[in-house]
Image: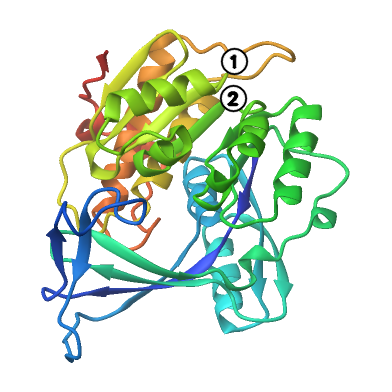
Amino acid sequence: MKLKILSVGTVTRDVFLKSRLFRVVKDEKHLSGPDFPTHEATCFAMGSKMEVEEPVVAVGGGAANAAVTFSRAELSSFVLAAAGDDEAGFSVLKDLKKEKVAPRILKRPGHTGFGVVLLSSGGERTILHHRGASNSLKASDVGPSFPYQALYLAPGNLPWAVSERIIARAVKAGAFVAINPSKAYLSDPSRLRHILSNAHVVVMNREEAASFTGLPYEYEDHIFRALDASISGIAVMTEGVKGAMVSDGKNILRAGIFPTVVVDSTGAGDAFGSAFVCSLLLNGIRPSKGEKLKVPLENLKEAMRFGAANSSAVVSKIGAHAGSLHLKDYSSKKYSHFNVREV
């Protein structure tokens, strides 16, 4: 019987716009502070009318992206999220069913969450995001039991009560818990630390980790070590097309992604984190009640290979999960040679 995993969070419908006139500029003097952690911005002429390539419309959102990763890897994938009672919500539902994800999409009045993704010629992206109905899940929408073996929580702007209840249900059931906290949750570090204490795997991108630890974005190594020290589970810090760092509290590992032509960096972190978790589950890694998750070093490295392969595939296509790998793809020669460094 396939392992059942539930992804909880947001689902959206996104439109991707690409133009050679979208430029990435870097200015350490004027582009600074928490709104510009990398000192970079997307720039285009004010008041102008610009040509864009043919728009691409695709389903996205952290929960949808993860659920597709799990389904294509032949896990029994479920998703819990909210969408508007509109055409976009129907499109989300249709896409997930096509991907063999069992969706529990709760229809709410209003619009389905959407994003406008501006892509530069180098694949860098800026996302204009409207959460819409995706924030409208309620604690009462979470059932009294948790009939799954694993949980992947990518909460977006979900109410804290929803996340806290679903985690409590999963922990009580002895399930594997992975959490990819959002920027919104970073605004309450003490409450976030409490829910992260129940996670076997915590995934953050470098910008989120810098915010969580209170350290400058430039101090990569310090950020990761502070993140690692703050959580009891496995820490994963993604850096888009640059790869990721991983620690189990004893070993710190670093790896890039496989060579690829970057078309769209949207979803690179989601792709790495969900495939990382997927590999652990496929290799039989399960929690023991009351004990820290035990993962052999070789399984950690294999999980990083899965993450890197999926991330490389995703950024090679437009759309946050269009390029997600199927299980057989991870065994291909293209992804067989992978270097993981022990730091």
Q: Position of residue 109 (x, y in %)?
A: 72, 80
> Given the image, on which type of amino acid does mark 1 rest?
Leu
| Frontmost residue, 149 versus 36 | 36
Please indicate whether residue 190 sits to the left or right of residue 271 in the image: right
**Quadrant position of residue 298:** top left
- The correct choice, above or below, for 21 with respect to 11 in the image is below
| Frontmost residue, 67 versus 60 | 60
> Given the image, on which type of amino acid does mark 2 rest?
His
Q: Position of residue 236 (x, y in %)?
A: 42, 29
Between the C-alphas of marks 2 and 1, the distance is 6 Å
- Name the residue beneath numbered marker 1: 293
Q: Residue at x 46, y 9 (%)?
A: 296
Q: Decide if residue 153 is in sight here.
A: yes
Identify the secondary structure beneath mark 2.
Answer: loop
Q: Residue at x 84, y 49 (%)?
A: 143
- Name the residue beneath numbered marker 2: 200
Please indicate whether residue 41 sits to the left or right of residue 155 in the image: left
Q: Residue at x 21, y 66 (%)?
A: 42
- The correct choice, above or below, for 289 with respect to 110 in the image is above
Q: Position of residue 91 (x, y in %)?
A: 54, 75
Q: Is the residue under label 1 in contact with that under label 2 (CB below 8 Å)?
A: yes
- How many numbered dots are placed on residues in this image? 2
| Frontmost residue, 333 versus 161 | 161
- The correct choice, above or below, for 324 with respect to 228 in the image is below
